[in-house]
Amino acid sequence: MQNLLNKVRIIGDPVLRRKSRPLVFPDDMPYIVSLVGTMEKTLEAAEGLGLAAPQVGESVRLFIAIPDYLDELNGHVVFINPEIHPYGDMEKREEGCLSVPGIYEMLSRSSRVNIKAADIRGNIFSLDVGGLAARLILHEVDHLDGILFVDKLSPIKRKLLKGRLRKLREGGRVY
Ligand SMILES: [Zn+2]
């Protein structure tokens, strides 16, 4: 859990492809507090919008959002063991990911999501979210199941990105 700052895992790292385990209350609480602290610093340094635990190498079901979304997320920034129900019309938005640096693509996802999760103290809460915050939640929950947004692009788009994705996997950043 040390020196994770600025070490966001990049596509090609196997931890991004694992299905993460649920966290347990109260046993995991000290670990959760430490992990969230690390993730908040990492997210701030990386200037992303959200960050899932696998992106810092921890295979557990937790993600965070930046405080800019506090209103839409009813004051929540930490989501543990999330359960989601996406609904509403499909909506196209540009998406990117700290683990797939330099690649931004339009992607269709449900426009709204119902989420139930635990906060850092283990209290369960539910939210009904739309807009960018819904997009963020759907993107981050995919990370917990080993899915990256580029997996969801059309075969044609994926083919076009093949070379750049391969370079990222091999360790070189491509912008
Ligand atoms: Zn991501």
Image: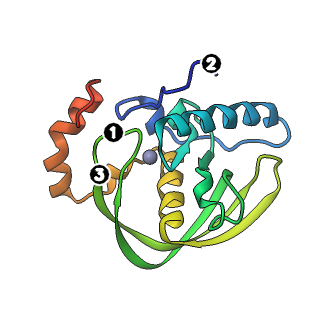
**Neighbours of disc 2 within 10 Å: few (<14), some (14-19), many (20+):** few
Q: Earlier in the sequence, mark 2 or mark 1?
A: 2
For the residues labelled 3 and 2, the Cα–Cα distance comes to: 30 Å
The amino acid type of the residue labelled 1 equals Pro
Identify the residue position indicated by label 2 in the image.
2
Q: Name above or below for residue 9 compared with residue 103.
A: above
Q: Is residue 10 above or below residue 102?
A: above
Q: At label 2, which amino acid type do we have?
A: Gln
Residue identifier under label 3: 104
Q: Residue at x 82, y 43 (%)?
A: 25
Label 1 sits on residue: 101
Residue at the farthest bottom position: 89
In terms of secondary structure, where does tag 3 sit? loop
x, y (%) of residue 154?
Answer: 23, 60
The answer to whether the residues at label 3 and label 2 have Cβ atoms under 8 Å apart is no
Q: Secondary structure at mark 1?
A: loop
Residue 53 percent coordinates (x, y): 58, 38
Q: Is residue 84 left or right of residue 30?
A: left
Does any atom of ligand 1 lie closer than 8 Å to the CB of label 2? Answer: no
Q: Position of residue 159 (x, y in %)?
A: 15, 49
**Mark 3 vs ligand 1: CB below 8 Å:** no
Question: How much space separates mark 1 and mark 3, taking CA atoms?
Answer: 8 Å
Q: Give the residue type that dot 3 points to.
A: Tyr
Is 62 in front, or is 27?
Answer: 62
In this rendering, the answer to whether 88 lies above or below 12 is below
